[in-house]
Amino acid sequence: VELPQVLTDALTGAIETTTQSMEWALLHLAMNPDAQERARVEAFVDDGHGVFPWIRACVKESLRLTPPFYLHFRQLVKPVRHTEAPWSETAPLTLPEGTVVVM
């Protein structure tokens, strides 16, 4: 693999995830007019500090609802028992509490 291709892929990936995150945030705001209006007012009533707590909260909530990546990591809060595990010769398989699962 050549360095220019790797750099191009990295840059494209960074731009794509940022664009996708912005698109989802705008869609979430469009679907919630009250939140959209509150964000609009906050953007135009800047106190000079550039903090924007409501807009920041909207962005965080949008990222929580629709993350820009396709792998989801979850930590089990209780053991999970698989009675059929075709990938394992030791089925049934029990995943203990605290195991991090990638979906």
Image: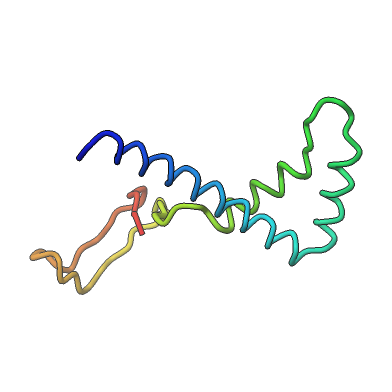
Name above or below for residue 12 compared with residue 37.
Answer: above
- In the picture, measured across the screen, residue 14 lies left or right of residue 99, that is right
Q: Where residue 45 appears, x then y in whole percent?
A: 91, 38
What residue is shown at x 69% (from left), y 57% (from top)? 26
Q: Quadrant of the N terminus?
A: top left
What residue is shown at x 66% (from left), y 55% (from top)? 25
What residue is shown at x 40% (from left), y 51% (from top)? 73
Name above or below for residue 51 compared with residue 64.
Answer: above
The number of discs equals 0
Colour approach in the figure: rainbow
What residue is shown at x 81% (from left), y 56% (from top)? 36
Q: Where residue 102 appears, x then y in whole percent?
A: 34, 54
Frontmost residue, 103 versus 85: 103
- In the picture, measured across the screen, residue 75 lies left or right of residue 68, that is left
Name above or below for residue 38 compared with residue 53.
Answer: below
Toward the bottom, the furthest residue is 84
Q: Where residue 77 appears, x then y in whole percent?
A: 43, 54
Toward the top, the furthest residue is 49
Q: Quadrant of the C terminus?
A: bottom left
Name above or below for residue 58 compared with residue 48.
Answer: below
Frontmost residue, 89 versus 1: 1
Toward the front, the furthest residue is 4
- In the picture, measured across the screen, residue 78 lies left or right of residue 83, that is right
